[in-house]
């Protein structure tokens, strides 16, 4: 049974501008792009989120978990869950804590094979997707990077303000 919201409760809400919400637009785009890449990578057995983690580890290994989170702008909970799954699939290894209390992530042979299987699929979908950007991908990518950096900076300021209250 669905309950209707009393129209009187909504009449005082000023919803102007919410359709251009940056978070909504980014999440909608991210969901669409993620679905596209997940579909393309499906034959390799990994998802686009796993591909991103595995390629970051492959490029920078051994890689501290904290640095991996920074690179991918992933919160600790999400990253821990993803790493647990990738370890269970034997695609990567996480070391015991080092003397600097860091845990390092490295790719396994199975992880390298997974990336090898996914790369041609990724290249195909990447090429097709980039063709839709009408030659503006590098500009768009750079702009997205700036926006991600700005968002992280604003988040840190807000987190600092919350901590001081």
Image (tube, rainbow, N blue to C red):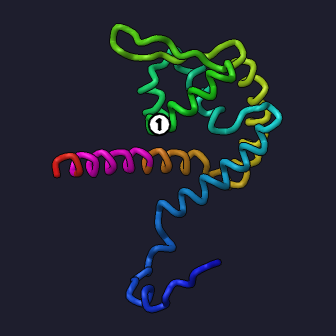
Q: In which quarter of the image is residue 47?
A: top right
Q: Quadrant of residue 149?
A: top left
Q: Is residue 92 above or below residue 29?
A: above
Examine the rendered structure and indicate whether residue 18 appears above or below residue 25.
below
- What residue occupies the far front of the structure in this picture? 1
Rendered position, 51 above or below 162: above
Judged left or right of residue 103, residue 126 is right
Viewed as shown, does residue 88 lie left or right of 125? left
Q: Which residue lies furthest to the right in this view?
A: 43
Residue visible at 49% across and 90% down in the picture: 7
Please, what is the dominant secondary structure of the magenta stretch? helix
* Secondary structure state at the residue bearing disc 1: helix
- From the top left corner, tell me how far across and down residue 24 is, in percent: 52, 63
Residue placed under numbered mark 1 in the picture: 77
The residue sitting at the top extreme is 99
- Residue at image point 47% right, 44% down: 145
Residue 68, position in %: x, y? 48, 28
Based on the picture, tell me whether residue 156 belongs to the magenta stretch.
yes
Residue 43 lies in the magenta-colored region: no
Number of labelled discs? Answer: 1
Question: Where does the magenta region start and end?
Answer: 148-161
Tell me the quarter of the image containing the N terminus. Answer: bottom right
In the displayed structure, 62 sits above or below 76; it is above
The image quarter containing residue 111 is top right
- 120 left or right of 94 in image: right
* Residue drawn 67% across the image and 39% down it: 48
Residue visible at 62% across and 16% down in the picture: 107
Closest to the observer, 126 or 110: 110
Crowd class of label 1 (few under 14; some 14 to 19; many from 20; radius 10 Å): few
**x and y percentages locating residue 100 in the rendered image:** 33, 12
């Amino acid at each position: 049974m669905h309950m209707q919201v009393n129209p009187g409760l909504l009449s005082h809400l000023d919803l102007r501008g919410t359709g251009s919400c940056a978070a909504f637009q980014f999440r909608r785009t991210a969901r669409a792009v993620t679905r596209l890449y997940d579909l393309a990578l499906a034959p390799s057995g990994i998802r686009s989120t796993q591909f991103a983690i595995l390629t970051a580890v492959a490029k920078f290994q051994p890689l501290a978990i904290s640095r991996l989170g920074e690179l991918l702008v992933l919160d600790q909970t999400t990253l821990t869950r993803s790493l647990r799954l990738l370890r269970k699939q034997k695609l990567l290894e996480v070391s015991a804590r080092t003397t600097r209390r860091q845990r390092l992530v490295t790719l396994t042979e199975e992880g390298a094979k997974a990336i090898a299987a996914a790369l041609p699929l990724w290249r195909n979908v990447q090429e097709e997707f980039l063709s839709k950007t009408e030659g503006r991908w590098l500009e768009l990518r750079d702009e997205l990077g700036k926006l991600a950096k700005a968002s992280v900076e604003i988040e840190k300021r807000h987190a600092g303000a919350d901590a001081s209250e």
